[in-house]
Image (cartoon, rainbow, N blue to C red):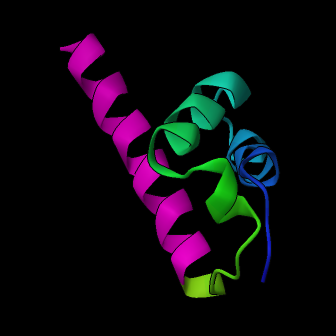
Amino acid sequence: MIITNVEIAKVIEKKGYDFQKALDSIDAGRTPDQETKEISIEEIDDMIKNICLAFEIEREEIIH
């Protein structure tokens, strides 16, 4: 599957997280060249899961 960083950030946004922050996180680890290459659904799901988990950990740290 070919999917852009923006498309992944939109999925994360639908889960209740900030779009720009999600996009910045993805852009930090995925180059524009990588956006044009195949990526498996499992890799996409892992990326989304890990970014959401990082946001949750960050929220917990802010609360405590």
Nearer to the camera, 8 or 53: 8
Label tally = 0
Magenta residue span: 43-64
In the image, residue 8 above or below residue 43: above
Question: Residue 13: x and y, percent?
Answer: 73, 39
The answer to whether 26 appears left or right of 46 in the picture is right
Residue 50 on image: x %, y % = 41, 57
* The C terminus - image quarter: top left
Q: Is residue 13 left or right of residue 34?
A: right
Q: How far from the left and from the top, in percent, is residue 6? A: 79, 44
Residue ranking furthest to the left: 64
20 and 16: which one is in front? 20
Furthest toward the front, the residue is 33
Residue at position x 65%, y 35% in the image: 23
Q: Residue at x 53, y 78 (%)?
A: 43
Please say whether residue 52 is one of the residues in the magenta stretch. Answer: yes
**Magenta region, mostly helix, strand or loop?**
helix
Residue 45 horizontal/vertical position (percent)? 57, 73
Front in this rendered view, residue 40 or 14: 40
Image quadrant in which you'd find residue 48: bottom right
Question: Does the magenta-highlighted stretch encompass residue 42?
Answer: no
Dividing the picture into quadrants, the one containing residue 62 is top left
At x 27%, y 14%, the residue is 63
The structure residue drawn at horizontal position 78% and vertical position 83%, both measured from the top left corner, is 1
Q: Is residue 24 above or below residue 50?
A: above
Which one is nearer the viewer's eye here, 12 or 29? 29
On screen, residue 18 above or below 51: above
